[in-house]
């Protein structure tokens, strides 16, 4: 069985290299149908609107999502797991997005287990 442990990874919760190289600061978009939109105070704390007035999760200086708690590659957790945007839910352990993010953060792409 192939296992990628999200709680010891968190790489997919970081801004992608191509975005950083292009100085693209919008991160995960929070769409109107996402559960986080129903929590305006939390939305304002964790997200920002771009010039098109689209909401996007904020990033910490290290490029990780502000909702990510812990250290990437060590021990992490999403502080808004139940409210996370659909875009976050779309990434699955071991899929191409996961493996690309792991490579970019210098984490092994070899599964455990």
Image (cartoon, rainbow, N blue to C red):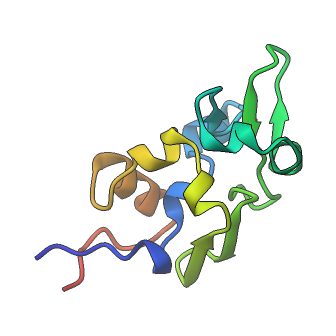
Point 50% across, 39% down: residue: 87
Instruction: Please determine whether, in this image, residue 20 is positioned above or below residue 84.
Output: above
Q: Is residue 10 left or right of residue 30?
A: left
Point 56% across, 84% down: residue: 75
State the residue lying farthest toward the front: 38
Front-most of residues 20 and 40: 40
One can see residue 23 in this view: no
Q: Position of residue 29 (x, y in %)?
A: 64, 33
Instruction: Please determine whether, in this image, residue 32 is positioned above or below residue 66.
Output: above
State the residue lying farthest toward the left: 1
One can see residue 9 in this view: yes
Looking at the image, how many numbered discs can be counted on the residues?
Answer: 0
Front-most of residues 51 and 34: 34
Snapshot quadrant of residue 37: top right
Quadrant (top left, top right, bottom left, bottom right) of the C terminus: bottom left
Q: Position of residue 21 (x, y in %)?
A: 65, 37
Q: Position of residue 72 (x, y in %)?
A: 59, 73
Q: Position of residue 6 (x, y in %)?
A: 43, 71
State the residue lying farthest toward the top: 52
Instruction: Please determine whether, in this image, residue 58 is positioned above or below residue 112.
Output: above
Point 51% across, 63% down: residue: 11
Front-most of residues 96 and 79: 79
Point 58% across, 77% down: residue: 76
Front-most of residues 82 and 14: 82
Quadrant (top left, top right, bottom left, bottom right) of the N terminus: bottom left
């Amino acid at each position: 069985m192939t296992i990628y442990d999200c709680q010891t990874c968190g790489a997919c919760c970081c801004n992608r290299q191509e975005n950083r190289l292009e100085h693209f600061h919008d991160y995960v978009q929070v769409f109107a149908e996402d559960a986080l939109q129903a929590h305006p105070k939390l939305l304002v704390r964790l997200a920002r609107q771009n010039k098109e007035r689209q909401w996007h999760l904020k990033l910490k200086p290290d490029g990780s999502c502000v909702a990510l708690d812990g250290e990437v590659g060590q021990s992490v957790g999403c502080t808004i797991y139940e409210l996370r945007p659909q875009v976050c839910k779309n990434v699955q352990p071991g899929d191409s997005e996961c493996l690309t993010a792991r490579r970019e953060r210098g984490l092994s792409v070899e599964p455990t287990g």
